[in-house]
Each structure stands twice: as C-alpha cells, then as structure tokens.
Amino acid sequence: MSLIASRMASLGTENAFRLGTDIAACVERGMDVVKLNLGEPDFDSAEHINREAIAQIEAGNSHYTDAQGVRSFREAIARHIRETRGIEADADRVVVTPGAKPPIGFTMLAYVEPGDEVIYPSPGFPIYESWVTFVGAKPVPLHLSEERGFAFTAEDLARLITERTKVVLFNSPSNPTGGVLSKADLEGIAAVVRERCRPDVRLYSDEVYEHILFDGEAHHSIASEDGMAERTVLVSGHSKGFAMTGWRLGWALLPTREEANLFKQININVVSCVPPFIQEAGRVAYESAETPATVERMVRAFEERRDYVVEALNGIDGVTCQNPKGAFYVFPNVAGLCRRLGVLDAFEALPEERRRSTCPSAMLQMFLLYRHGVATMDRNSFGRIGAEGQHYLRLSIATGMDRLREGVRRVAEAGEDREGFASYVEEGGKLR
Ligand SMILES: Cc1ncc(COP(=O)(O)O)c(C=O)c1O
C-alpha cells in the first residue's frame, strides 16, 4: 500500500502559481524580476466594492450561508446573464463558487465517466487538461492555430466529436492566446453541436474574461445561440473583469435545477459556502453605477499596453506576435528566437528522459528568468498533449507600462545572448 493515492499522478497543475518558487529563488539571489507570468490585473478591487464588504462584515454578515449562494447575489447574476446573453436565467439555476476555477472540476465530477471524451482548447487554461486526466476521461485537445488568430472553425470541432464525447470546453476571450470567438464562429459551432452532439453532451463556456475586450469587440456567448442554453454550463466571475482575484468569487449557470443542485452538493462537500460578505460585494459590482467606468479604465489601460507590447515583440528578431482581441495576455511565437539562441539544438541534445520533462519554450522561459530576470510562461503550461514542436511564450500585460517596457527590453537582450544560453545549459541551469 503506498502513501499517496495513485489518482494524484493524473492531476496536473497551473504553472503560473508554481513559478513563484523560481521567482523567489531569483529574488533571494538579489535579482530584480519583472513578473509577466501571473494572470491577474495589477489594479486593486474598486473602492465601492471594498466598502460594501467592510460594511457587511461590520453588520455581522459573517456566518455560514446558502451553499448555492445568497439569493440577492444569484438574482444579480441571473439579471446580468439575461441582459448580456439574451437568454433565460433564473437564480435557482445559478451556483456561486469560490472563483471561476472550481466549476471546471465540478463539471468533470458531475458529468464525466472514465473513458468519456472531453474536448478542450489547446493552448488553453491548464486546469481543463488537468481535470480531464484526473477523472480518467480521454483528453481530446482542440488545437488552436496561430494562422487563424487562435480561433477554430466549426469543421475543426466537428472532426473531434464522437459518440463518446461528453463535454466540450470553450474559452472566449481566451487564456493564453487572447483569441475571441466571433458571433459567426459561434453560429457555426452551434450548428455542429446541434447536428452532431447528443442532447446530454454538455458545453462548458468559460467566459471569465467577458469584460476584457479590445478594438470595440463585443462579447458573445455560445449559450446565446439557438438551442445551446439548455446544453451549456455558463461560467464567469469577478476575478478578471472586476480585479477581484483574491476574493475568490465566481459562478455557474446550469441548464437545469437538478444540475445546479449537483454543483451545490459539491460546494457542500468541499467549501460549504462562499463568504456572504464577499457575495454581497459581488452583487454591488453588478448593481453599482460606478462599476462600468472602473472596468472601462482598466480595459483601456490593457489595450494601450497591448498596442505597445505587440509592436515591441514583433520588433525582436525571431519573434512574431498576433494582436489579441481580449483578455490580458500576448502569446508570441518564439520559434525563431529559440533557433537563434540554440535552444532547439540544446533540447535535441538532452537525454530522452530529460526531454520528456521539458520543452524548448520552457528552457527559454527558465533562461529568461534566471539569467535575464523576466518571468514568462511556456507553451506547455497551457496543455501538454500534442504540443510538441510548438514554441510560444505567454506574457501577461497586467503590469504597469514601465515594467512591461523593461520586461520586453530584457527579452530582446536575452535574444542576443547566445553565449549566455550555452553557458546556462553547460552550468546545469534549471530547464523547467
Ligand atoms: C480561462 C480561465 N478560467 C478560469 C480561471 C480561474 O479564475 P478564478 O481565479 O476566478 O478561479 C482563469 C484564471 O486564470 C482563467 O484564465
């Protein structure tokens, strides 16, 4: 009998959190690190939202509450959904969760049997692949290609659907690519789903970046398409759009009350409930007339940084970067940079065992961090299956313009440091 249950070997992770140890090691050595790794706004939560939470605590609203979420907040969520997605939504089908992350696992636990197939975007939020493998389902990555702006077509999806398909995950605007599914994309996808998927196949629409769109783009949801609401687990939350990552506040709208009850049941088993004062503050985020201007200010700042960073990265020899339409990441292709620095050759020269535990973009990521003091994320941190031969980095633009400029300057400087990379590998520098 072993100490650790075997299922733990199939649980993945989110490297953006794990990289903290490497950053701390660099800081301990006296390095100044530009952190372009974490996916959270550098803005604080708004004052009017903070004030509500404080007032609620002071009024004694600090006890256990309904495991499904307090009704006032669920009603505000349902109203928000009706207004922005144009679909029916009632508070009885809404479940409040500690962040937009938990519903991913809840969905796998509630609907997926071992051997079922789950389709998810790759590159995509790493927790999708993590949960798919954890529950023993078959991971079916839907590869997003750079040439098509990291979107996918209905035909791409149709090719992956089989009679074993149980859940299809979407994420728009996307982490890590910033890609956005257009209304036309969604219409095509919905047609494929209507035609090819049994009614018990669930779509999981992760819309946590719904507020963060550029160039006048509007947010569209698959749930708004004909016949899709009754199949969709629609998920969003307050972490990104309202800069409330540490509050841990998210929600899911389920197709039926019975399914909402399953999510409630998992809440009861794991967290009991989300703190009521946080939910009331979350309600104010939706109801206050002060919120839209706060969100707008932040989104315009991201857009300005996006404009700067895309141009600056495209100016680096060996880097090409698409223009993201939403979220707060850029996802440059660094294949040329890897080639110039000798990363691809160094990767090929590794023993097979070592090669399995890293990839060229992770080697570049470590070199950038440990030698040039800039923290980024590698391609394989966004889904490992089928990612061979893809060389990308994700840079978060949720950091001030000065630090962003400094970070890009360091990437450019590292690109000229072929000797430095060779010595980094020779001296046994960390490669993942
Ligand atoms: C696509 C996506 N979904 C869900 C989450 C989780 O959000 P939360 O912090 O609200 O749990 C993130 C966070 O990075 C994300 O990028």
Image (cartoon, grey):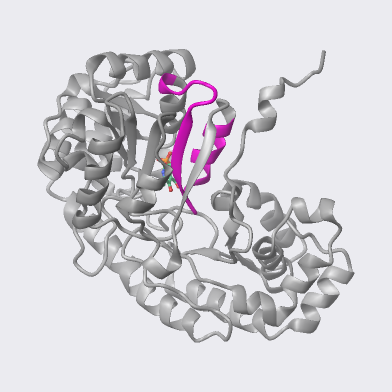
- In this view of the protein, can residue 320 be seen by the observer? yes
Which quarter of the rendering shows the C terminus? bottom right
Image quadrant in which the N terminus is located: top right
Q: Position of residue 331 (x, y in %)?
A: 48, 66
Left or right: where does residue 160 sit relative to residue 66?
Answer: right
Residue name at image x 18 percent, y 23 percent? 91
Q: Is residue 50 above or below residue 184?
A: above
User: Quarter for ligand 1?
Assistant: top left
Which stretch appears magenta?
Answer: 110-133
Residue shown at 46% from the left, 26% from the top:
108
Q: Residue at x 69, y 65 (%)?
A: 360
Horizontal side of 122 relative to 30 (left or right) equals left
Q: Does residue 381 show up magenta in the picture?
A: no
Give how far across and how far down residue 294 sits, in percent: 23, 56
Residue 342 at x, y = what percent? 75, 77
Q: Is residue 63 visible in this depiction of the protein? A: no
Q: Does 126 lie within the magenta span?
A: yes
Q: Position of residue 397 (x, y in %)?
A: 44, 65
